[in-house]
Amino acid sequence: MTVSVVQFGGSNCDRDAVRALDRVGVDAERVWHEDGLPADSEGVVLPGGFSYGDYLRAGAMAAHSPIMNEVRAAAEDGVPVLGVCNGAQIGSESRLTPGAFTTNRSARFQCEDVFLRVENADTPWTEAYEEGDVIELPIAHGEGRFEIDDAAYDELVDDDRVLFRYCDADGNVTDEANPNGSKGNVAGILGERETVAVLMPHPERAALAELGGSTDGQGVLDGFA
Amino acid sequence: MTAYTATVTVRLKRGVLDPEAETTQKTLERLGFELADLRSADQFEVDLDAESADAAAERADEMAQRLLANPTLHDYDVVVEERGA
């Protein structure tokens, strides 16, 4: 399994993703977006960062770069695709997943650790956890507020496509525990296939024990194992 | 072909929280201005040549749908005018 970590101009979590995937036993390499997606990619990570300087809207420009046509085609063939932070914004802008990530309720860039409740443990990205588990991951974003119209939100919930919700340390999904004003405290969702997922928190920044923080992110990366 | 300018205005849908507008409003109030509400919008002026104003509007509309606006968040409108010689 070789996972392609797509590097756009302004990506800055691509190296971290490769390192963290290596730690969970997944071979990964960085791929410059202009070089196209290697035909033998067995997985794709859209990493965090500030692709194209967040011009227009975070992720909007990268979503229309030619490599994203290849990523969409791979996703439709069942290749696992994970978008993290800016990668989540790119995923939603390219319609890999529904809804949008937009300006935080605070109108500020927020860099902090958050708690997430696992909403559905029956997906490749969450099967390392149990439903209801509380994990701790860092966020670092200014445009992470999940917005979606009510009908599409109800459909997401009915289809069990919410992966994580922001919560407190005890797993209570409250407004106080919602760092950015996301609808329903949603932090991560599935696309139409369970092999496609996006989330704003950074699992790759919580995967190496020697950094001294949480290693709860390993379970998400296990989705590629 | 005629030269046109298509002005595309992209606004947040009613009901979508606009933290930047709220912050801007608070700052205006801090400066002593009285105002009831404030909404922000992005405006794009696209110079293009087309067979007709309708054709120019149609092209600008597609630009809005595919890139300039995000349908989850935004409404938009397009106004086309002939570009002065």
Image: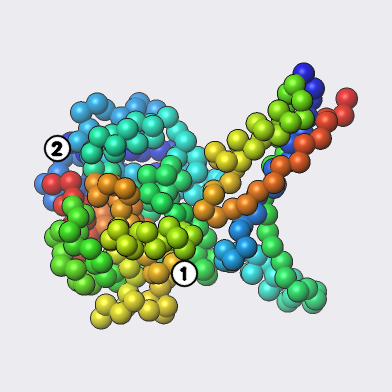
Q: Which mark is residue A181?
A: 1
Which callout, 2 or 1, points at the residue further toward the start of the chain?
A: 2
Q: Work out whether residue A197 or residue A168 is closer to the camera in this orientation and state it.
A: A197
Which image quarter: residue A137?
A: bottom left
Q: Position of residue B43 (x, y in %)?
A: 70, 47
Label 1 environment density (alpha carbons within 10 Å; few <14, some 14–19, many ≥20):
many
Q: Residue at x 54, y 38 (%)?
A: B66
Q: Secondary structure at mark 2?
A: loop
Image side of residue A30 versus residue A102, left or right: left
Q: Amino acid at mark 1?
A: Gly
Q: Which mark is residue A114?
A: none
Q: Amino acid at mark 2?
A: Met
Residues under numbered marks 2 and 1 in contact, where contact means CB atoms less than 8 Å apart? no
Decide: is B7 above or below A33: below
On the image, numbered disc 2 is attached to which residue? A1
Which-is-in-front pick, marks 2 and 1?
1
Q: Work out whether residue A122 or residue B19 is closer to the camera in this orientation and state it.
A: A122
> Which of the chains bears the disc numbered 1?
A
Label 2 environment density (alpha carbons within 10 Å; few <14, some 14–19, many ≥20):
few
Residue A136 showing in the rendered view: no
Q: Residue at x 34, y 76 (%)?
A: A173
Q: Work out whether residue A67 or residue A99 is closer to the camera in this orientation and state it.
A: A99
Q: Secondary structure at mark 1?
A: loop
Residue A107 showing in the rendered view: yes
Q: Residue furthest left?
A: A25
Q: Position of residue A119 (x, y in %)?
A: 25, 66
Badges 2 and 1, same chain: yes
Q: Position of residue A125 (x, y in %)?
A: 21, 54
Query: What number of labels is visible?
Result: 2
Q: Position of residue B8 (x, y in %)?
A: 69, 43
